C-alpha cells in the first residue's frame, strides 16, 4: 500500500482532507498486514471507518474485541514511529 492510495481513499471515498501523514499510515498498515498475513485494505477500513473484519474477529456486538483493539493500537504505534522518523 502506498501513501498516495491512502490519501486518495481518504479524499475520494471518505470525502475528507487527510490530517495525518498518509505515507507513514500506509507503512504502518502494510507492516501490520504482513504480520497478520491479512489484506491491507481491510486493515485500512478497520482503522479509518471502524469496519469489522470477521476473519480476524475484530468486533463483537458492534464493539472492538481485545484482538481488534490490539490491531488498531499497534497500527497507531507504528504510525507514530514512522511519522517521527520522517
Image (cartoon, grey):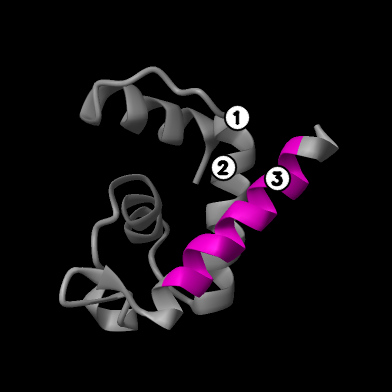
Q: Residue at point 52% right, 73% down?
A: 70
Q: Write down the region rendered in magenta.
A: 69-83
Instruction: Give me the C-alpha separation between circle 2 and circle 1.
Output: 6 Å
Check if residue 81 falls in the magenta segment: yes
Q: Residue at point 35% right, 29% down?
A: 10
Instruction: Check disc 3 and report the residue beneath it.
Output: 80
Drawn side of residue 65 relative to residue 27, left or right: left
Q: Nearer the viewer, residue 11 or 5?
A: 11
How far across and how far down the image is residue 37, in percent? Answer: 48, 77
Q: What element carries label 1?
A: loop
Q: Do the residues labelled 1 and 3 touch (CB within 8 Å)?
A: no
Q: In this view, does 17 lie above or below 31?
A: above
Q: What element carries label 2?
A: helix
Instruction: Give me the C-alpha separation between circle 3 and circle 2.
Output: 9 Å
Q: Nearer the viewer, mark 1 or mark 3?
A: 3
Drawn side of residue 63 relative to residue 8, left or right: left
Instruction: Check disc 1 and report the residue beneath it.
Output: 21
Instruction: Check disc 2 and report the residue beneath it.
Output: 25
Drawn side of residue 71 relative to residue 65, left or right: right
How far across and how far down the image is residue 82, in percent? Answer: 74, 44
- Residue occupying the far top of the picture: 17
How far across and how far down the image is residue 3, in percent? Answer: 54, 33
Amino acid at each position: 500500500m502506498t501513501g498516495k492510495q491512502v490519501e486518495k481513499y481518504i479524499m475520494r471515498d471518505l470525502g475528507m482532507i487527510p490530517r495525518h501523514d498518509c505515507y507513514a499510515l500506509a507503512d504502518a498498515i502494510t507492516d501490520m498486514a504482513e504480520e497478520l498475513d491479512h489484506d491491507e485494505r481491510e486493515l485500512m477500513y478497520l482503522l479509518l471507518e471502524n469496519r469489522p473484519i470477521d476473519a480476524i474477529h475484530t468486533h463483537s456486538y458492534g464493539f472492538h474485541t481485545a484482538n481488534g483493539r490490539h490491531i488498531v493500537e499497534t497500527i497507531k504505534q507504528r504510525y507514530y514511529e514512522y511519522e517521527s522518523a520522517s
